[in-house]
Image (cartoon, grey):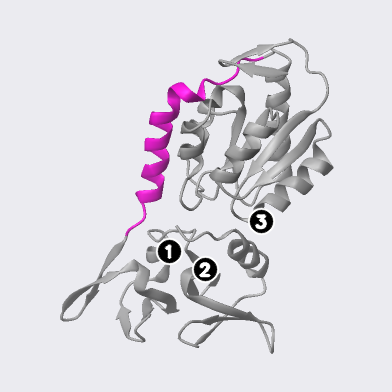
């Protein structure tokens, strides 16, 4: 199975699909690798790369048929990598942490999209599409043709979330930088903002209203009463309960129900 200019030679797939996993998060790479081994016997993981630089070197030295490619990586993102290679040679499955409705609309531009944390059934679905492409049953996506539009739409998702907030009070309002918010606490219908300079602002609006406008990759709801900024998370403790220790040394409770999602969120977290 060899890709050339978006076309497939050798109509039937022989052997396994050799894939390269590209993601700067070792936990994410390991998760995909293990699920491919367990659920997708048609696939061979031929290598893993933690950056675009390493991926390019591996692509130059070995034959791969497909890429499982993270979008958000330091220095060069997934689009940068595709711009630097002949991407028509590969079936590309993007992986992303952005849970947006536009993801489904963008699927036509690549073999598929996988939302982190990756689910086995979604991974299997993507591999089945690869197999159909390899067997010539469906046409390969012309991702290179759609890349500018795709990048624009994904960048829009990245920029959707606010970088500044206007917090009203009885005397007027205060404009704050979102990056300086350490965590939020619910107090009935009020929300208490805790900042990195140890100051506080109380706002007469429910915490849910702010959860909807803050980037879910960065701000995680660890309890019905608390949302933390993962950039300010210092430690996690299981002594006498579950607690997130923030950089101001305050401990914020983590609910037992939210604990598995919290661990996954921390593992998948990338500083953008």
Q: Nearer the observer, disc 3 or disc 2?
A: 3
Q: Is residue 32 above or below residue 183?
A: above
Q: Residues within 10 Å of mark 3 (few under 14, many from 20)?
A: some
At 66% across and 56% down in the image, what residue appears?
26
Give the total number of marks visible in the rendering.
3
Disc 1 crowd, CA 10 A, few/some/many (<14, 14-19, 20+): some
Q: Where is residue 217 drawn, in percent x and y?
A: 49, 58
Indicate which disc residue 26 carries. Answer: 3
Dominant secondary-structure state across the stretch colored magenta: helix
Alpha carbons under labels 3 and 1: distance apart: 28 Å
Residue 153 belongs to the span the image colors magenta: yes
Q: Place residue 133 in its image quadrant.
A: top right
Marks 1 and 2, the one that precedes in the sequence:
1
* Residue picked out by circle 2: 221
* Residue 251 can be seen in this image: yes
Of the image marks 3 and 2, the number of the one nearer the N terminus: 3
Tag shown at residue 188: none
Q: CA distance from mark 1 to mark 2?
A: 8 Å
Q: Is residue 18 magenta?
A: no
**Secondary structure category for the residue under label 2:** strand
Which residue carries the number 1 mark?
211
Which callout, 3 or 1, points to the residue nearer the camera?
Answer: 3
N-term-proximal mark, 3 vs 1:
3
**Which residues lie in the magenta part?**
138-162
Image quadrant containing the C terminus: bottom left
Does the CB distance between marks 1 and 2 fall below 8 Å?
yes
As helix, strand or loop, the secondary structure at mark 1 comes to: helix
Q: Residue at x 44, y 78 (%)?
A: 185
Q: Nearer the viewer, residue 69 or 204?
A: 69
């Amino acid at each position: 199975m060899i890709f050339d200019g978006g076309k497939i030679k050798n109509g039937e797939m022989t052997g396994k699909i050799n894939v390269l996993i590209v993601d700067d998060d070792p936990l994410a790479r390991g998760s995909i690798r293990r699920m491919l081994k367990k659920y997708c016997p048609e696939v061979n993981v031929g290598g893993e790369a933690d950056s675009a630089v390493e991926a390019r070197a591996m692509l130059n030295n070995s034959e791969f048929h497909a890429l499982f490619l993270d979008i958000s990586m330091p220095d060069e993102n997934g689009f940068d990598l595709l711009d630097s290679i002949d991407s028509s040679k590969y079936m590309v499955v993007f992986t992303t942490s952005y849970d947006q409705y536009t993801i489904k609309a963008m699927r036509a531009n690549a073999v598929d999209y996988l939302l982190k944390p990756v689910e086995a059934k979604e991974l299997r679905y993507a591999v089945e599409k690869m197999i159909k492409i390899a067997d010539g049953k469906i046409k390969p996506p012309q991702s290179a043709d759609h890349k500018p539009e795709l990048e624009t739409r994904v960048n829009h998702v990245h920029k959707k979330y606010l970088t500044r907030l206007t917090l009203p009070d009885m005397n007027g309002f205060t404009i704050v930088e979102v990056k300086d918010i350490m965590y939020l606490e619910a107090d009935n219908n009020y929300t208490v903002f805790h900042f990195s300079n140890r100051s506080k602002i109380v706002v007469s609006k429910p915490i849910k209203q702010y959860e909807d406008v803050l980037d879910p990759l960065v701000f995680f709801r660890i309890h019905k009463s608390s949302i933390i900024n993962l950039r300010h998370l210092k430690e996690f403790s299981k002594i006498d309960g579950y607690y997130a220790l923030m950089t101001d040394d305050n401990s914020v409770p983590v609910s037992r129900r939210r604990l598995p999602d919290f661990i996954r969120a921390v593992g998948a977290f990338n500083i953008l």
